[in-house]
Image (tube, rainbow, N blue to C red):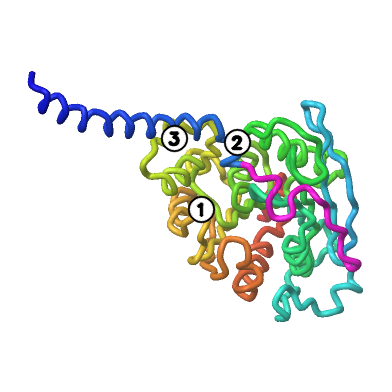
Amino acid sequence: MNTAVRRRRWLIAVPLVVAIGGYLGAAVYMMANETSFVFHPDQYGGRTMVAAAADLPVEAVRIPTPDSLTLSAWVIPPMSAAERAIPDLGATGAPVPTDTFSTEDAPLWVLFLHGNAANISVPLRQAWIHPMRALGVGLVLVDYRGYGASDDGPLTEEGLYRDARATFDWLTTERGVDPSHVVIFGHSLGSGVATHLAARVGAAGLALEGAFTSIPDVGAGRYPWLPVRWLARERFASLDRADSIAMPKLLLHAEDDGAIPFTMGQQLFAAFEAPKTFATLTGGHDRAFAADSATYFGTLRDWLATLRVIDRESPLPG
């Protein structure tokens, strides 16, 4: 073989080896750092807790988990009759409709499961809490292990599932709230946690905002040149369990969501069985409640009203 031929082969082989090595290196890097791709407890305020606004009656509690951690949570009761007499201007200055149902008789409680960054106390979340209370519900917001003031613990899919179930069990046992008066609400990453919980407990309903079909699907969209669906260990596979959730479902998704594609929310909604409701919003991934408050809270108001039913274990009238 002459020197010219060998040189041409090397010119082909070396870039190919480099390309393959780089591809494999990127795949290995993604596998080794999957936790930091999925969970961001140090972003958007990180673990620093912000004091609750003076007009938010927050009770800070600690909730134990089965693996001996304690979670930081806020319990915020429904508005009193006196508070409801004062119009709530919500996040944008627009009045929030409150004439939905009585809160004195078995109020609904929203168990809120947040996304992969920040904590329950950040100003944006407090801005959401105010108009939510105006809808006549109580709220329980919890920080997963490793977030906010919660104990450190392994950040894994199973760990977050364990935290959500511990919070639900605490609410329905220690606080005595009937499961039929609990609404499970998941935003972003929390939507994957919420669907897992909803597939395993009885509750009044499931609300999802900015929801995805699965983490591998999200990753494949962001890194189409990598075999993300094969590499991912953390899955949060909401689409796979969609047909296991019988309770009423509400999906809220902004068309201009830059984090989770709007089409992904539509796909998940299509997989759910009735009863289900879909609301199309504007305002991106985190701020639709402020940018499109009339649609956001109007849809929630109407949907929550449908959940106000008598004891679900009692015979139906007639």
**Position of the C terminus by quadrant:** bottom right
Residue 196 lies, with reference to residue 28, above or below; the image says: below
Q: Nearer the viewer, residue 19 or 137?
A: 19
In three-dimensional space, the C-alpha distance between marks 2 and 1, rounded to whole angstroms, equals: 34 Å
**Label total for image:** 3
Amino acid type, mark 2? Thr
Residue 165 lies, with reference to residue 141, above or below; the image says: above
Q: Is residue 108 visible?
A: yes
Is label 1 in a helix, a strand or a loop?
loop
Determine whether label 2 and label 1 are within 8 Å by CB.
no
Magenta residue span: 39-55
Q: Residue furthest left?
A: 1
Q: Residue furthest front?
A: 3
Determine whether label 3 and label 2 are within 8 Å by CB.
no
Mark identifier at residue 26: 3
Residue 32 is left or right of residue 164, and the answer is left
- Residue 84 in percent (x, y) is at 85, 74
Q: Is residue 43 magenta?
A: yes
Which residue in the structure is indicated by mark 1?
Answer: 274
Which comes before the other along the chain, label 3 or label 1?
3
